[in-house]
Image (cartoon, coloured by chain):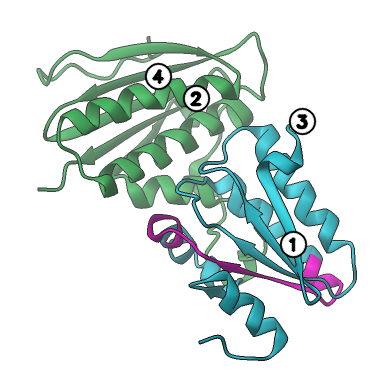
Chain colours: A cyan, B green
Amino acid sequence: MPDADNLVRIEDRQGVKLVRLRASALLTEEEVETVGEALLGLAEVPGQRIVLSFLGVTHITSVVLNRLVLAQRRLEESGGEMRLADIDPHVYEMFTITRLDRRFRIFEREDEAVASFLGRAEG
Amino acid sequence: MPRQPPLSDGAGPWTERVLPTALEHIRPAERDVLERLGELGYSDDDRFGVRLALEEALVNAMKHGNKMDLSKHVHMAYRLSAERAEIHVADEGEGFDPGQVPDPTCDENLAKPCGRGVMLMRCYMDEVTYRDKGREVHMVKYRRP
């Protein structure tokens, strides 16, 4: 299993967990599993609020989308939510085709997504 | 070699590869295809779509078809021209009925982690045809001018 620190970096922004992916493409089972486990680990905290930044990620597959769906479902069960940001146009198109833009609130930039949780607009 | 080779129609030879059932073999296989598509003038949009569809097909073949059985292989063949990219992927599994894959865009399925790979392949390729009880998938992408 790859080291999670090599694939994700997690910061706390006033109680909002900002998760940045550090790979441009996620394919191997181990990579996706590692990222998925990191998200599910955060989701164990009731009411957890997560911003997942895709900055620099240019390629994903349906396996990643499915992991995100699972994490979102787990978060919602405990009153939390994951919002997404910085999604490459090609990758964003995958969200719209699969209608997952209805499952996730998606922001252009991570700061906007964090601010949305904190109840303020980010200019 | 594809288990049921695509019909020869004079459009050029097929390049054939036999991949072990291990996900690390996917990236090198798709790299060859993408490099050739770049040389043939396919756009970034087209190459993104082909890469995604090929990856989904190979992952499906290894995980769901061969069930990661190391004794089985995935048979890939492709034929690329300036007009179209044809890709054929076959596994050695038990097959499946693509018609039974639930539509992941239905409201009741949005929170379920399944069905998106097949759907994305259909969206990004111009033709997707399953044969041999779902063990083989044949995909075509026409180059955008």
Look at the image and tell me whether residue A12 can be seen. Answer: yes
Residue beneath disc 3 = A1
- Please tell me whether mark 2 or mark 3 is closer to you in this view: 3
Name the residue beneath numbered marker 1: A11
What residue is shown at x 26% (from left), y 36% (from top)? B140
10 Å crowding of disc 2: few (<14), some (14-19), many (20+): many
Residue B28 placement, left or right of A12: left
Chain on which label 2 sits: B
Q: What residue type is labelled 2?
A: Ile
Q: What element carries label 2?
A: helix
Circle 4 or circle 1, nearest the eye: 1
Gap between marks 4 and 3, in whole Å?
28 Å
Q: How far apart are marks 2 and 1 (CA)?
A: 33 Å
Question: At x 62% / y 29%, what residue is drawn?
Answer: B63
Q: Point out residue A33 in the picture as x, y percentages from the top left corner.
A: 72, 40
In the foreground, B102 or A35: A35
Region of the chain picked out in magenta, as a range:
A75-92
Question: Callout 1: 10 Å neighbours few (<14), some, many (20+)?
Answer: few
Q: In this view, does A52 lie to the left or right of B34?
A: right
Q: What element carries label 1?
A: strand
Mark 4 touching mark 3, by CB under 8 A? no
Q: Do tag 2 and tag 4 residues touch (Cβ < 8 Å)? A: no
Q: In which quarter of the image is residue A93?
A: bottom left
Which residue reaches farthest bottom?
Answer: A120
Helix, strand or loop at label 3? It is loop
| Residue type, numbered disc 3 | Met
Residue where numbered disc 2 is placed? B26
Comes first in the chain, label 2 or label 4: 2
Q: Distance between the residues labelled 2 and 4?
A: 11 Å
Q: Mark 4 points at which residue?
A: B76
Examine the rendering and report whether any part of residue B113 can be seen: no
In three-dimensional space, the C-alpha distance between marks 2 and 3, rounded to whole angstroms, equals 18 Å
